[in-house]
Amino acid sequence: MIGVKKGFVKEEQYLPETVVCTTITGERVRLNTAQVQLDTPYFTGVAKVCVLPEKTVADVIIGNVEGVLECNCLDAINVCEKDHYGCAMTRAMKRRNNQNKPFQNVMISLHASATDFKTAEREDASLKKCLDQVNRNDDGSIRFILFNDFLYREKHAHTCVTRQLVVPSQFRMDVLKLAHDIPLAGHQGMRRTKKRIQSQFYWPGMYREINKYVKSCHICQKCSKKGPATSRAPLQKMPVITTPFHRLAIDLVGPLAKSDGWRLSH
């Protein structure tokens, strides 16, 4: 598909139909279409394009369409890694710089090959119904297909087609960990974890397993701000003290460990 910024499309070039496109952030938006004449170094001719908003960075975005020329050269841009200023380094700035730890690479290994995955799909009893529905010529919006010997689930919604890889039982826990546990996943809630997994994968009873996995996550239980309402202590009536210092309230805590970078005694 080709995208052209709205300012370059004339009113008489608009077409009646619309298309659903997925942005770089994963958001799906419905855009108008038009038929315009393009003259670029990589594509020339009349093409059906989607009309992009004015806030789009590029004027024209060319996808993998027929007739497009391949570009093997990119202009090199010299970027200064660090600007040098004559500012003094304060102790607070130095302490913040020392506390910043570099992000470590996330090592992901499924300990299985593509052949093992294909074999597991064929032998998994929970996927038998999915395999039986492969290439059935029904008019439903959902169908199962084999693509490169992998089992996929295709979901048709308007003009958008979502293709999901069907995951056998032995690999489902790996998918759940990738979508929820690793640092790049961020331990999101049930709704976002479902949205992330269903954009690429599918298996029977997927939503139920995702809900159970997120609810039982130990880190989420410790760090979540939400708690059951029954754990809150009810308010109690306090006696009115008429004489000063007749009653004293003292909180005893400790011993407290010293904070990093601070020399404070407790």
Image (spheres, rainbow, N blue to C red):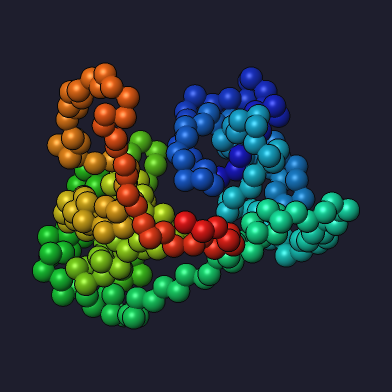
Name the residue located 49 percent from the left edge and 24 percent from the top edge. 16
Residue 11 lies, with reference to residue 115, above or below; the image says above
Tell me if residue 245 can be seen.
yes
**Is 136 left, or right, of 245 in this rendering?**
left
Most foreground residue, 257 or 25: 257
Q: Could you say which quadrant of the image residue 80 lies in?
A: bottom right
Residue 256 x %, y %? 41, 59
Q: x and y percent of residue 124 in the render?
A: 15, 71
Task: State whether residue 129 is above or below residue 208.
Answer: below
Look at the image and tell me in which quarter the N terminus lies: top right
Figure quadrant of residue 240: top left
Please tell me which residue lies in front, 15 or 176. 176
**Where residue 45 sits in the image (x, y, percent)?**
69, 42
Residue visible at 70% across and 27% down? 7
Image spot of residue 21 (x, y percent)? 48, 40
Residue at 88% from the left image edge and 53% from the top image edge: 86
**136 vs 50, nearest the viewer:** 50
Residue drawn at (19%, 47%) of the image: 138
In this view, 157 is above or below 7: below
Q: Do we see residue 145 in this rendering?
A: no
Residue situated furthest right in the rendering: 86
Image label count: 0
